[in-house]
Image: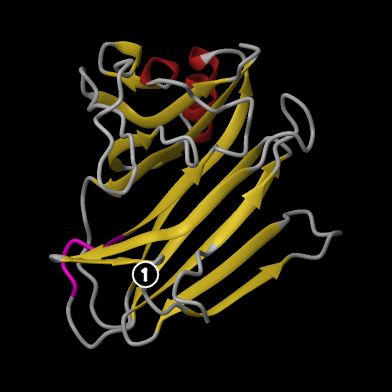
Amino acid sequence: MNAHFRPNIVWYPERPQPRRNTVVIWSPEVVCHDDKTYGSWNVPVTDVHIDQADSESECKFVNMSCSHPGIYRVDTICKYIDPNCLEIQLVLTNLSEQLWQNAYAEACIQLATAPDFRYADGAAVFYASTDGIRHFAKEFMPVNEWGCQFLKDPEVPFEHPLMMVPSSCAKYTFGHAFSGSGTIFGNGAPRIHCVHSYRPAHLPTLEPGQSTTQTGLIFVAEGGPSQALEYYLKWQGQ
């Protein structure tokens, strides 16, 4: 398999218009433990397969398994909650013979092919801070050696690891979060326009053969960031 293969799942929310916006789930983008980082764009990834539930199933899902032999396996399980919400589970398994500290997998949610949710600057991306809903600084960080234009760190700490991008028509808001995440950020480079909610605040230790699971979602809510936060909190059972 090509070393530059990227394990992607695509999703088409119905809002604001069916089949207009393509959201790309790159999973995993990286796998980390201890002081090691494995990027799925530059390592020989094998054993990629996709299972899809029968169309008559009450719970439609896609399961993409991606493994780096002798190191890790990541199962990305996407469950269709409704036409505008996808629940995502990242299951990271330690395939090595070593004990892993601080292990996690990270997914990159890309909006470059979702024209209604591409953001031109940081002020178009919102988060739920400890002081209410706020937007990121308008200016991106300087372009780095990989062509990335990262959002600046939140000025006020976040309360919920939820990233929100209102639609260009201002009638809907895209949201993404993984429960318990300790980091949120985005990359506004034109070819990417991604949002991230990742790196659990409490990182696990994984014995050989042991797995850890992160659960999150991507969705399009009707209304602005306040309504998107309400949608997320309802999903959380709050």
Residue 186 shown left or right of residue 207 in the figure:
right
Going by the picture, which residue comes out furthest to the right?
A: 56
Q: Residue visible at 26% across and 83% down?
A: 208
Q: Is residue 77 magenta?
A: no
Q: Nearer the viewer, residue 206 or 168?
A: 168
Locate the C terminus and report the quarter of the image it occupies.
Answer: top left
Q: Say what secondary structure mark 1 lies in.
A: loop
Magenta segment, which residues? Answer: 100-104
Residue 180 image offset from top left, x and y in percent: 32, 42
Residue 28 at x, y = what percent?
43, 61
- Residue at the (68%, 71%) spot, across then down: 51
Give percent across and percent down for residue 179.
Answer: 38, 42
Tell me if residue 103 is in the magenta stretch.
yes
- Seen in the picture, residue 99 relative to 18 is either above or below; the reply is below
Majority secondary structure in the magenta region: loop
* Residue 78 position by quadrant: bottom right
Q: Which residue is mark 1?
A: 42
The residue lying at 49 percent from left, 55 percent from top is 26
Neighbour tally class for label 1: few under 14, some 14-19, many 20 plus, Cα within 10 Å: few
Q: In the rendered view, tell whether residue 36 sits above or below residue 167.
A: below
Q: Position of residue 225 (x, y in %)?
A: 49, 16
149 left or right of 99 in image: right
Disc 1 residue type?
A: Asn
Query: Relative to residue 226, is residue 237 depicted above or below?
Result: below
Q: Quadrant of residue 62?
A: bottom right
